Amino acid sequence: MTENVKINRGLKGIYFERSGVSHIDGAAGELSYRGYSIHDLATKSTFEEVCYLLIHGELPTQDELTAFDATLKAARELPDQVYDIIRATKDGHPMDVLRTAVSALAALEADSQNVGPEAFLANGLRLTSQVPMIIAAHENIRNGRDPVPADKTLSHAANWLWMLKGEKPSEDAARLADVDFILHAEHGANASSFAARVTIGTEANLHGGIVTALSTLAGPAHGGAAEDVMKMVHEIGTPDNAAAYVKAKRKNREAVTGFGHRVYRAEDPRARHMRDGVKKLGEEMGAPEWYEILQGVVDAMKPYARHGLNVNVDFYSGVIYQLHGIPMDLYVPIFAIGRMPGWIIQCMDQQDSNILIRPLTLYNGPDMRPYTPMTKR
């Protein structure tokens, strides 16, 4: 009866829902949000504007963007108890601290328990502002410093760098962080977004969905690529070693970090914007060798591009963070800052036409058999 059942491990190639949020053409290497090319958004838009676009479906007017931005800035507050929780867990991994703090917010903020569409949006926007606050506060607390209060005059990206480092970022640094957030804002039914939808499918609140997403993103197979690339760059050491490093990896049939993607067969369309940023930032900070090492790896990997092993967005992100002096264990939390609007709209879409997500597993265990009493085992 079950012999003809096809198993799609990892649900690969399975469409479980319709979505008008983002479109990915893996063969052509194209990505769009709500019909707008990622290239236009990365070069012409801001993270706040992209948040509005993803959540509301259209680009905002100036008045709409001003009101939306004001809502985000007003939400840059955390209960005192959250800072106590961060202090109590300061020695943990930043993703564990972030997940714990978001879970605590569900218990500390009464509005988090509301599950109507308007409440989902309000809770989502509040969390979008609170997540970078939690990450920055933890980084300061674990290093013996007081948290840096949010600056409600700065953009989302600039305020993140301000809270993290306690100094106002340059316009270029803030813009590069802004682009990084835009590029990571949404990416279809990736593992963390799908996991969040599974949670919302049970009629859970938005905080529950975001906690699920954070837990899933923390896995190295999903959110850890940027950190792994930076480890690779340190291992290579100099641009002259890149070709030999790649040759040794391929000879041993080992993957080269930052190449290949579950959905893209061509180059990840987001990569070019991070590549340009790495080159410029490296030159400005007197450390061009990081970019040169990356490009050495890219050149050595060119023969494998026809097999779908093209560079992905996280190949360049880690070096940008490194140039800013950001610890490697913060790379995945930074990914979470950018992905917040994507998770929010995925949760809202799931709620809008909800159905419990309940796939099947094909049983391949023993046939039915009689129970054996303890005395006869």
Image (tube, grey):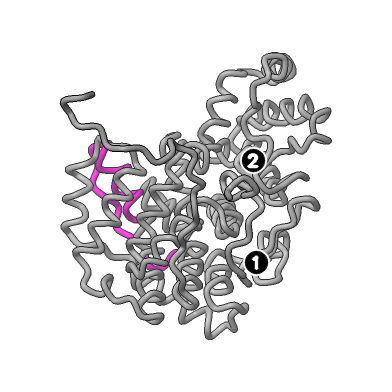
Residue at x 48% of width, y 62% of height: 343
Rendering coords of residue 152 (x, y %): 37, 67
Judge by depth and name the residue closer to the eye, 50 or 24.
Answer: 24
In-front residue for pair 187/366 = 366
Residue beneath the point at 42% across and 54% down:
213
Looking at the picture, how far across and down is residue 99, in whole percent? 32, 50
Which quadrant of the rendered structure holds the C terminus?
A: top left
Q: Amino acid at mark 1?
A: Tyr
Badge 2 local density, few (<14 within 10 Å), some, or many (20+)?
many
* 321 with respect to 196 (left or right): right
In magenta, the rendered stretch is: 133-154
Q: Report which residue position mark 1 lands on.
A: 33
The tag on residue 278 is 2
Dot 1 or dot 2, earlier in sequence: 1
How many marks the image carries: the answer is 2
Q: Above or below — where is 238 with respect to 1? A: above
Relative placement, left or right, of 246 versus 122 is: right
The answer to whether 34 is drawn above or below residue 267 in the figure is below
Give the camera-side residue of 246 and 11: 11
Label 1 environment density (alpha carbons within 10 Å; few <14, some 14–19, many ≥20): many
Tell whether position 140 is magenta.
Answer: yes
In reply to whether residue 164 is colored magenta, the answer given is no
**Which quadrant holds residue 75?**
bottom left
